[in-house]
Amino acid sequence: MNTERDQRQTIQPSSLLWKLARHGLEFRGTTMTRWCEQNGIDRRNAWRAVTGQRDGAKARLLRDRILKEAGVIDGG
């Protein structure tokens, strides 16, 4: 059984992950831009977190939040 931690360890930040997150949000009826605006997040920071340009604690939390909301990992 995959735990949330296992999922995070196997998912590598990348431009492909960004595309998956964008399409996941679109499937749920919103866009990345709209989701960021509604959540008070600068879209550039979201991109940096999901693609791995930033990988500090806050960036990892943001990446997990976006991926959950997009349905890429469990919890959204």
Image (tube, grey):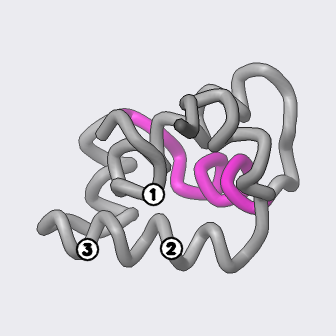
- Image height of 54 relative to 35, above or below: above
* Image marks 2 and 1: residues in contact by CB distance under 8 Å: yes
In the picture of the structure, the residue carrying the numbered disc 1 is 72
Please report whichever mark, 1 or 3, sits nearer to the chain's N-terminal start: 3
Q: Residue at x 56, y 30 (%)?
A: 3
Q: Is residue 1 left or right of residue 60?
A: left
The local crowd at label 1, few if under 14, some if 14 to 19, many if 20 or more residues have their Cα within 10 Å, is: many
Instruction: Magenta stretch: give its range.
Output: 40-51
Q: Is residue 49 magenta?
A: yes
> The disc labelled 3 sits on which kind of residue?
Glu
> The disc labelled 1 sits on which kind of residue?
Val
**Which secondary structure, mark 2?**
helix
Q: Residue at x 54, y 78 (%)?
A: 19
Q: Nearer the viewer, residue 40 or 15?
A: 15
| Of the two numbered discs 2 and 3 in the rendering, the one whose residue sits closer to the viewer | 2
- Image height of 20 relative to 53, above or below: below
Q: Quadrant of residue 50?
A: bottom right
> The disc labelled 2 sits on which kind of residue?
Leu
Residue 48: image location, x then y, percent: 74, 54
Q: Which numbered dot is residue 26?
A: 3
Q: Nearer the viewer, residue 24 or 75?
A: 75
Between marks 2 and 3, how big is the CA–CA gap?
10 Å
**Which secondary structure, mark 3?**
helix
Between marks 2 and 1, how big is the CA–CA gap?
7 Å
Q: Is residue 11 left or right of residue 21?
A: right
In the picture of the structure, the residue carrying the numbered disc 2 is 20
Q: Is residue 41 magenta?
A: yes
